[in-house]
Image (cartoon, rainbow, N blue to C red):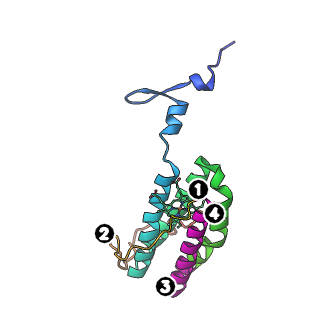
Amino acid sequence: MAEFPFVSDVKVPTKDNELSLAEMSEALPDTATIMTRVGECWWHLIYAARGGNWGLADYYLRRVVKLENTLVTLRPKHRERMARFQRQAVPPVLAAMEAQDLEALEAAFQAATDMANSLHGESGYSYIRWELPGEPPKGLHLGAMEPAADAPSGNGQVGRQ
Ligand code: HEM
């Protein structure tokens, strides 16, 4: 009968090395790294919507949700607080974006930001208070875009990742 190694003895060959599962797990992004990316996407989202590039704003909302889902997969201790944020704060943001209603989006974005900062407090990080940078992000076109004639339709919304 074949003998299986203990999980702790399993080595995974990579291009340059052989790593144990524990070493691979330690190399995964930590909460702070994921949250830094969430903060950047959140910043990009509102400036894209303000500029009229609603497709880009939708793209960043999907990235935020995907990063948050990755976070709770890696760190389930954040699951309950994250689920509350996704249940309460994200749907009004999504609805305003689907309606391309900037006024409603500004209100929903501010409410979601306030909730995120309150959840930072609940998580033990009351000194982490996300603030919207006064400058738009550089390097991406934030203005309205003509839809490409040959673009696939319905290329993803929150929930369709
Ligand atoms: C759009 C919403 C959110 C934004 C923009 C945001 C942004 C940030 C930022 C910029 C940091 C600091 C990262 C760093 O520079 O080290 C952070 C940390 C953190 N956030 Fe959020 N956050 C959001 C939502 C949430 C939610 C819903 C939770 C609920 C679990 C959460 C939990 C945390 C935790 C636990 C940290 C501390 C990370 C650590 O050092 O281990 N955040 N967040």
Q: Which mark is residue 69?
A: 1
Q: What's the residue type where badge 1 is placed?
A: Asn
Q: Among all residues in the image, which is located at the extreme front?
A: 127
Q: Residues within 10 Å of mark 1 (few under 14, many from 20)?
A: some
Q: Label 4 CB, ligand 1: below 8 Å? A: yes
Quarter-wise, where is residue 112 in the image? Answer: bottom right
Q: Is residue 117 left or right of residue 87?
A: left
Q: Is residue 148 above or below residue 99?
A: above
Q: Which mark is residue 154?
A: none
Q: Quadrant of the N terminus?
A: top right
Quarter-wise, where is residue 104 in the image? Answer: bottom right
Does residue 114 appear in the picture of this structure?
A: yes
Q: Residues within 10 Å of mark 2 (few under 14, many from 20)?
A: few
Secondary structure at numbered mark 2:
loop
Tell me the residue at 66%/14% (across/down).
2
Residue located beneath label 2 in the image: 138
Residue located beneath label 4 in the image: 122
- Residue extent of the magenta highlight: 96-124
- Quick one: label 3 or label 2, which is nearer the N terminus? 3
Mark 2 to mark 1: distance in Å? 27 Å
- Quick one: label 4 or label 1, which is nearer the N terminus? 1
Q: What's the residue type where badge 3 is placed?
A: Leu
